């Protein structure tokens, strides 16, 4: 081996070593930034302790953390490639996405052949003995298109009195620009993906289509008119539920006369039996009201035939237990999550050992619930009476004892009194296996309304808020049933415009929606 060859190999090794060292430096720096972000999030967002008293609670999938994690992984992969040679990192990693992408997505295949398939020993062409296959998710940017509808006219050549032509189909906007699919996309973008009209208008402008927010709002308002029978049937379906969840959240509405916003409220009602293995589909319905008083709750629940309302400790719900109904007054089931949050706050602010112990006992109740979720009501009830009832039996006298030891005016005493005052309704889950420990099913739905509210700031008027509630209801039901809301809304609008009979309106509910054959194939 000549000195020239040795010098070239040494130079190549030095270059690879330098590249590896640079990649490792990048990896260490990325690791440091990731640890710094996590540390700051723990300190600023959660304080010294978490609600679950478990270090894993800190490892939330926050976007900034995931971004830093991606930087770290890329740096590490680059270091591995530099150490083992180009391509080693990819060949050693499993194809994690293979087999998990939906079958209805089109597959665009490409084959990457080696530069040369001749045997280096001079034996000739090599034979194919196998292949590695990977699937990656790609996207075709959204593209607007123009649907041209032609309706030929026919006339008899022998007589001039007869002309035939197919009837023009009904549309949400007669003679207007949008198809039902486009209107459905606009509705879901705002009320499902929290993208206000003005931002959508900017997106369409980038494709050369000028649409102002007023035009988009008009389209959506027309669609709401046609979709009203669907919302009415959803409400009728909810009326038959034996147990419902109920909650409310603010809905700022523009008050034109004062040039300010006034505070209205969205009320959410949910029926969800999946926790005890129920066969009925989950249903959610939003309503708008100008206030938060009991009168609105009573109005929304008029005609309901159920027995239980699972709710928070807001005093307006107490009036439900004093109304005359054929089915008898409502029975309230209060939420352990709301009681727990009070003790979490005391632990974070004051470091109270009493609050910490209260949280541990509540955590035991949730551990039991986790083990019985999805089981039949009888099995859930048996497990609760065997495992949760002893915790409840010891928890109340313990709270009473702690209350006698601390100042009556303290915040902790106030939290303990809140819990004890609602003890019968907090422990009602020990009487019926269908009941839940908390109101999470309805809070999860309310949270989506809050996201749209954050981006849209306020509703333009009360009618707009009512339409907001209607569309949020339809989209939320689609998501709960695992249905694509754009496909559902566009197909449902088409069916209603084509004269779908009212007697078969249940066939248009999200839980009965069938994926179009063109997609399923």
Image: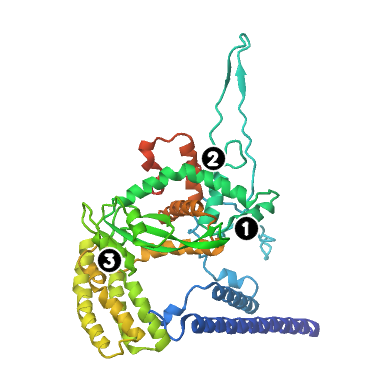
Q: In the image, residue 325 lies at what x, y percent? A: 23, 53
Residue at mark 1 = 199
Taking the spot 43% from the left edge, 78% from the top edge, the residue there is 57
Residue at mark 2 = 172
Q: Is residue 284 visible?
A: yes
Left or right side of 265 for 372: left
Q: In the image, residue 401 lies at what x, y percent? A: 23, 87
First of labels 1, 3 by sequence position: 1
Instruction: Work out whether residue 276 or residue 196 is closer to the camera in this orientation and state it.
Output: 196
Q: What colour scheme has been applied to the protein in the rendered image?
A: rainbow
Quarter where residue 418 is shown: bottom left
Q: In the image, residue 365 lies at what x, y percent? A: 28, 75
Crowding at mark 2 (Cα within 10 Å: few <14, some 14-19, many 20+):
many
Q: In the rendering, which numbered label is found on residue 57? A: none
375 up-or-down from 28: above or below: above
Report the Cα–Cα distance between label 1 and label 3: 41 Å
Residue at mark 3 = 333
Left or right side of 128 for 426: left
Crowding at mark 1 (Cα within 10 Å: few <14, some 14-19, many 20+):
some
Q: Residue furthest right?
A: 4
Instruction: Work out whether residue 421 or residue 426 is closer to the camera in this orientation and state it.
Output: 421
Taking the spot 60% from the left edge, 72% from the top edge, the residue there is 88
Quarter where residue 332 is shown: bottom left
Report the Cα–Cα distance between label 2 and label 3: 43 Å
């Amino acid at each position: 081996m000549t000195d020239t060859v040795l010098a070239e190999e040494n130079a190549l090794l030095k270059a690879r070593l330098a590249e590896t060292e640079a990649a490792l430096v990048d990896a260490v720096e990325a690791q440091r930034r990731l640890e710094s972000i996590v540390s700051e999030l723990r300190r600023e967002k959660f304080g010294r302790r978490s609600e679950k008293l478990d270090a894993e609670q800190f490892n939330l999938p926050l976007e900034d953390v995931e971004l830093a994690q991606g930087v770290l992984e890329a740096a590490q992969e680059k270091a591995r490639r530099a150490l083992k040679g180009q391509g080693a990192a990819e060949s050693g990693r499993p194809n994690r996405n293979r087999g998990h992408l939906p079958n209805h997505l089109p597959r665009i295949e490409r084959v990457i052949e080696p530069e040369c398939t001749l045997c280096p020993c001079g034996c000739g062409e090599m034979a194919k003995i196998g292949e590695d296959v990977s699937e990656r998710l790609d996207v075709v940017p959204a593209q607007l298109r123009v649907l041209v509808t032609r309706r030929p006219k026919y006339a008899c050549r022998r007589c001039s009195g007869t002309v035939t032509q197919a009837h023009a189909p009904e549309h949400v906007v007669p003679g207007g620009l949008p198809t039902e699919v486009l209107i459905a996309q606009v509705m879901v973008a705002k009320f499902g993906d929290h993208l206000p009209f003005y931002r959508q208008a900017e997106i369409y402008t980038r494709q050369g289509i000028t649409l102002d927010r007023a035009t988009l709002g008009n389209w959506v308002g027309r669609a709401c008119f046609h979709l009203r029978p669907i919302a009415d049937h959803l409400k009728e379906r909810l009326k038959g539920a034996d147990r419902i969840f109920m909650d409310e959240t603010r809905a700022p509405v523009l008050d034109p006369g004062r040039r300010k916003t006034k505070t209205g409220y969205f009320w959410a009602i949910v029926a969800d039996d999946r926790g005890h293995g129920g066969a009925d589909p989950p249903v959610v319905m939003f309503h708008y009201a100008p206030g938060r008083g009991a009168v609105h709750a009573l109005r929304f629940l008029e005609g309901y035939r159920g027995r239980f309302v699972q709710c928070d400790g807001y005093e307006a719900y107490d009036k439900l237990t004093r109304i005359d109904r054929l089915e008898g007054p409502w029975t309230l089931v209060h939420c352990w999550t709301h009681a727990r949050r009070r003790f979490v706050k005391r632990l974070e602010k004051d470091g109270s050992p009493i609050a910490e112990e209260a949280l541990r006992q509540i955590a035991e109740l949730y551990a039991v619930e986790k083990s019985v979720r999805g089981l039949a009501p009888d099995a859930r009830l048996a497990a609760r009476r065997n495992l949760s009832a002893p915790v409840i039996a010891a928890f109340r006298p313990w709270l009473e004892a702690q209350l006698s030891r601390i100042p009556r005016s303290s915040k902790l005493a106030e939290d303990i009194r809140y819990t004890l005052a609602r003890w019968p309704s907090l422990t009602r889950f020990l009487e019926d296996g269908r009941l839940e420990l908390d109101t999470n099913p309805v809070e999860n739905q309310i949270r989506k309304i809050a996201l749209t509210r954050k981006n849209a700031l306020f509703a333009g008027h009360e009618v707009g808020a009512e339409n907001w509630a209607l569309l949020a209801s339809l989209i939320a039901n689609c998501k709960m049933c695992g249905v694509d809301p754009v496909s559902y809304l566009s197909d449902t609008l088409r069916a209603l415009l084509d004269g779908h009979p009212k007697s078969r309106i249940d066939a248009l509910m999200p839980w009965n929606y069938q994926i179009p054959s063109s997609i399923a194939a």
